[in-house]
Amino acid sequence: MNYKLTMTETAGISDMPFDEYNSRQLHEISAERNRERALNAKPAGNFIYNGDSLSPQKYEGFAVVSMLSDNIENEALTARLIEIQKELQYNLQPAYAFYHLPAESFHQTIANTLSANRFNEYIVEAGLLDAYPAIVGNAFDQISVVENEEPIRMKMAGLSVFGTAIGILGVFENEEDYERIIRFRSDFYNNDRLAQLTVKMTRPFIGHITLAYIEHFLNKNQKDHLAVVISEINEVLASEENYFTIADTGLRRYHHLAGFIKKDNYPTHLL
């Protein structure tokens, strides 16, 4: 959810071609890249240590996401991710520097909408909090549904340290699975009503599930150790077949980054 990428405004923001996307993901889980990323890791500021435990800080918004828990076929992946979190908790120090997200929050962001200050300005202050789900629903209605009997399958390839978080990155074996997500995003972000609310693509699609946030400054030894732990886990993951099955996506509300709420009037869309 909090995957941060920087791209020049002159280059614009667009989703990557299939081969480039997969190559980028595999590069990001390499030992060399994770060491580089770990050395530049810093606190996210999303969870605060109160002397006993880490507690979520307010961060409001809406997003279009696919939850692992929405599909029974993801039970094995969820269990594996919990095991990975336990490995991280056992090995990483100091323990209070890492907030491990609850399994019920595991998700793939399909499209960001509005959060933090922009959420407050364009939804809350504009009086659209109750109407916003219908606005997103109307946008969904204008996106064509492609007849496809099989859900999207994203292979979870390995762990990556990205800025302020640790997540597992996904690649696609079937190009059409990737294109289904990219087409949805293109149609969604080209909706005129959403554009009026400044909803736009701010980063390329990155297949990932965030597992933990870094919430304390790490010294060099701790950063080196983080990179080693990540690489050791990735060596095991390389021989595994862990898949995220994605059949649909939908609007979720969050008050912080450890919980994503679905209400009866929140729209969903088949992918």
Image (cartoon, grey):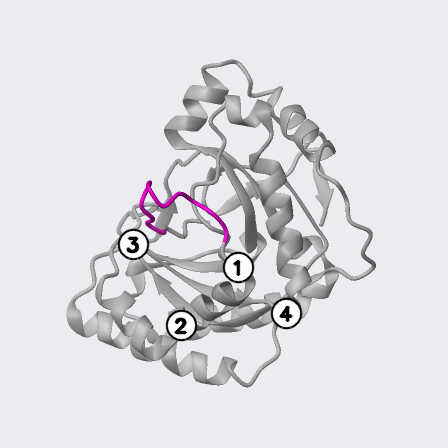
In the rendered image, residue 11 lying in the magenta stretch gets the answer yes
Badge 3 crowding class, 10 Å Cα cut-off, few under 14, some 14 to 19, many 20 or more, is many
Label located before the other in sequence (2 or 4): 2
Label located before the other in sequence (3 or 4): 3
Q: Which residue, given by chain and number where applicable, does mark 1 sit on?
A: 17
Q: Which residue, given by chain and number where applicable, does mark 3 sit on?
A: 215
Label located before the other in sequence (2 or 1): 1
Label located before the other in sequence (1 or 3): 1
Q: Which residue, given by chain and number where applicable, does mark 2 sit on?
A: 27
Instruction: Depth check: give the residue in front, 137 or 230.
Output: 137
Residue 230's tag is none
Badge 4 crowding class, 10 Å Cα cut-off, few under 14, some 14 to 19, many 20 or more, is many
User: How far apart are the alpha carbons under marks 1 and 3?
Assistant: 33 Å
State the image coordinates of residue 243 (x, y, percent, origin top left): 63, 69
Q: Which amino acid is tagged 4?
A: Tyr
Q: Which residues are magenta?
A: 5-15
